[in-house]
Image (cartoon, rainbow, N blue to C red):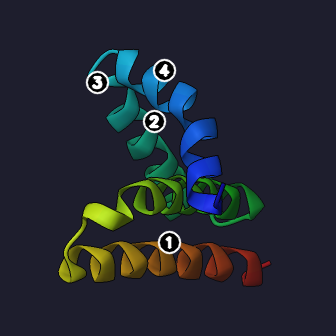
Amino acid sequence: MGLRDLVERHSATTVVFLHRLPPWALPLVVAVLMLVGLFVHSWVGALAMTALALFLAWFAYLSWPGLPWPGRVLRVAAVLLLLAFALGDITRF
């Protein structure tokens, strides 16, 4: 059993949980994390951006085999951009 199988199996319950949430819940959480990360310039903002980057990286890993290369590039760029914002928040104080 490879790493992908292990991650997919352990992620299944979380994905089902997220799928059962109301349709507005996940975008709301993402928007709140993004706003906190952009406007709170402290470790709290860095933590919000890092959490968002990890969430996006996890989803990107799960969907990676079915993505064309432009989708892969965009997901990697988005994760790196979020981590750059988090690093910027950390280095400000």
- The kind of residue tagged 1 is Leu
Quarter of the image that includes the N terminus: bottom right
Marks 1 and 2, how far apart at CA: 15 Å
**Disc nearer the start of the sequence (3/1):** 3
Q: Are marks 2 and 3 in contact (CB under 8 Å)?
A: no
Q: Residue at x 69, y 57 (%)?
A: 47
What crowding class fits label 3: few (fewer than 14 Cα within 10 Å), some (14-19), or many (20 or more)?
few
- The kind of residue tagged 2 is Val
Marks 1 and 4, how far apart at CA: 25 Å
Marks 3 and 1, how far apart at CA: 22 Å
Q: Secondary structure at mark 1?
A: helix
Marks 2 and 3, how far apart at CA: 9 Å
- The kind of residue tagged 4 is Phe
Can you see residue 67?
yes
Residue 6, compared with residue 89, is above or below; it is above
Picture disc at residue 29: 2
Q: Which residue is mark 3?
A: 24
Marks 2 and 4, how far apart at CA: 14 Å
Q: Nearer the viewer, mark 1 or mark 4?
A: 4
Picture disc at residue 82: 1
The one of 42 and 56 positioned closer to us in this rendering? 56
Marks 4 and 3, how far apart at CA: 14 Å
What crowding class fits label 1: few (fewer than 14 Cα within 10 Å), some (14-19), or many (20 or more)?
many
Q: Are marks 1 and 4 in contact (CB under 8 Å)?
A: no
**Disc nearer the start of the sequence (4/3):** 4
| Corner quadrant of residue 20 | top left
Picture disc at residue 17: 4
Image mark count:
4
Quarter of the image that includes the C terminus: bottom right
